[in-house]
Image (tube, rainbow, N blue to C red):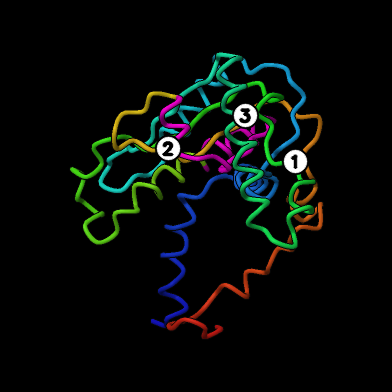
Amino acid sequence: MTDENTSKPQEAAINSHAFSEAERAAVYRAIAERRDMRHFSGGSVAPELLARLLNAAHQAPSVGLMQPWRFIRITSVELRRQIKALVEAERVRTAEAMGERSSEFMRLKVEGIEDSAELLVACLMDGRECYIFGRRTLPQMDLASLSCAIQNLWLAARAEGLGMGWVSLFDPVALGELLGLPEGAEPLALLCLGPVSEFYPRPMLVEEGWAEERPLADMLFENHWGRQP
């Protein structure tokens, strides 16, 4: 029996687990059209929809099943204002560190905190040091797990027609104090979520001329670092 013949039953077995063509296309579309949004159109997110999105985040993979994610929903207008002030302060400090690109950076819209329907703070839980499974040599896998949860939320939001933006311009210590985080917990992301008038056709930083995307071929190696396939 040839290798070609023996491979066919294996391929059939693998394909039997695949989604339908339309379902696969929807998954890849959500991935391709996900955008880090900064422009929102107000409105609201229905409670049942928000619950569905957060449940999608909660189904993310996590190392050792530690589920390190904690989400804080910000419903206070005053607290939003204070969070925005923290972001603005860091925006100025980041611009100062940019050197010759400082003015260019300050022209970018970096958040939608006051415009988005919902504001969530994604945090790493406290007490993570007791989780050793999968983290003994790579303790940062807690951060990787939370990032997977955020990506789940992002893709689900896009599939539901909602925009989401990840804001990382803030002092984590100051934000943690503002939100009353326990010792050891860390805020990782401000997530602006809600209706948008349109999605960017390309990443906003590409549209604004800040950066250009690089092709996958530049980042794919074979067997050793730097060796192209």
- Residue tagged 1: 109
Quadrant occupied by the C terminus? bottom right
Tell me how far mark 3 sits from mark 1, CA to CA: 13 Å
**Vertical order, 11 against 202 (above or below):** below
Q: Callout 2, which amino acid?
A: Val
Q: Which residue is mark 3?
A: 84
Q: Position of residue 151 (x, y in %)?
A: 52, 43
Give yes or no for residue 168 being in the magenta stretch. Answer: yes
At a point 44% along the width and 58% down the height, the residue shown is: 14
Earlier-in-chain disc, 1 versus 2 = 1
Residue situated in front as seen by the camera: 21 or 103: 103
Q: At 56% across and 43% down in the image, what residue appears?
A: 168
Question: Is 75 part of what is drawn in magenta?
Answer: no
Residue mark closest to the camera, 1 vs 2 = 2
Q: Quadrant of residue 123?
A: top left
Q: Secondary structure at mark 2?
A: helix
Q: Which residue was labeled with disc 2?
A: 173
Chain part drawn in magenta? 151-178
Q: CA distance from mark 1 to mark 2?
A: 24 Å
Res 135 quadrant in image: bottom left
In the figure, 36 relative to 117: above or below?
below
Label 1 close to label 2 by CB (< 8 Å): no
Q: CA distance from mark 2 to mark 3?
A: 15 Å
Q: Disc 3 or 1, which lies upstream in sequence?
A: 3
**In which quadrant will I find the N terminus?**
bottom left
Say what amino acid the circle numbered 3 marks. Lys
Q: Image check: 112 left or right of 79?
A: right
